[in-house]
Image (spheres, helix red, strand yellow):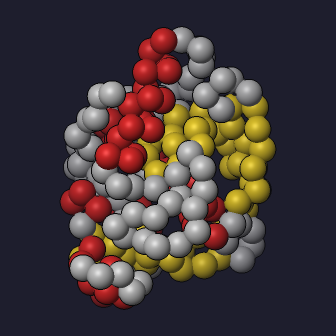
Amino acid sequence: MIIKEIIQIGNPILSRPSKFVAKIGAEETQRVITNLADSVRHHDLIGMAASQIGEKLKIFVTEVRKTKYRNLPTDKLRVYINPEIVWSSKKQVVIYEGCGSVAYAKLFAPVRRPEKITIEANDENGNKFRLDASGMLSRVIQHEYDHLNGIEFTEKITDMRKIMSSEEYKKMVGLKT
Ligand SMILES: [Zn+2]
């Protein structure tokens, strides 16, 4: 298990688009997937993109579960390789987001995005899948998908006056600080 320090906003690695993964079964690709799965848990996050650990590949993971920032329903660990969001709902919702690459998830802010999406991707075994997502899973998928295009959530903050620290965010969602 290799846990990597999360690359922070301002580092040009985060703002460059990621590359298509040609060989999913390759040892190198599998190493990145393992590092992502280990790192997302170690840092107590619910999603992480390869660029955040310095790998410019179209890979991200999600694991919507209970963390120090949230106490809501859970989802299994999912791996998305060469993903494509093929449908987004017209309806949009504003939800607070944080990011391991923005002051180590110490800053939260409201972002507007489609409520539901459909994504197509390959899993860690190279099998293609299609997933309809809503709620927090939809939200984290869209956030991580943006990372593959070099976009950070701070570019999409809907109201700068509503930015808050992680401590205030946890109070807002009813978690003990
Ligand atoms: Zn992020």
Is residue 87 visible in the rendered image? The answer is yes
Give the percent coordinates (x, y) of residue 155.
Answer: 39, 64
Most extreme residue toward the top is 26
Q: In screen coordinates, is 55 left or right of 29?
A: left
Q: Which residue is drawn at 54% across and 79% down?
A: 94
Q: Position of residue 23 (x, y in %)?
A: 59, 14
Residue 160, quarter of the rendered image: bottom left
User: On the image, which quarter does residue 113 sit in?
Assistant: bottom right
When asked about the image quadrant of residue 175, the answer is bottom left
Residue ID at (68%, 32%): 122
Q: Which residue is drawn at 32% across and 36% down?
A: 53
Left or right of 3 in this view: 123: right
In the picture, which quadrant includes the C terminus? bottom left
Left or right position of 62 against 102: right
Looking at the rendering, in which quadrant would you find the N terminus?
top left
x then y, percent, for residue 44: 35, 55
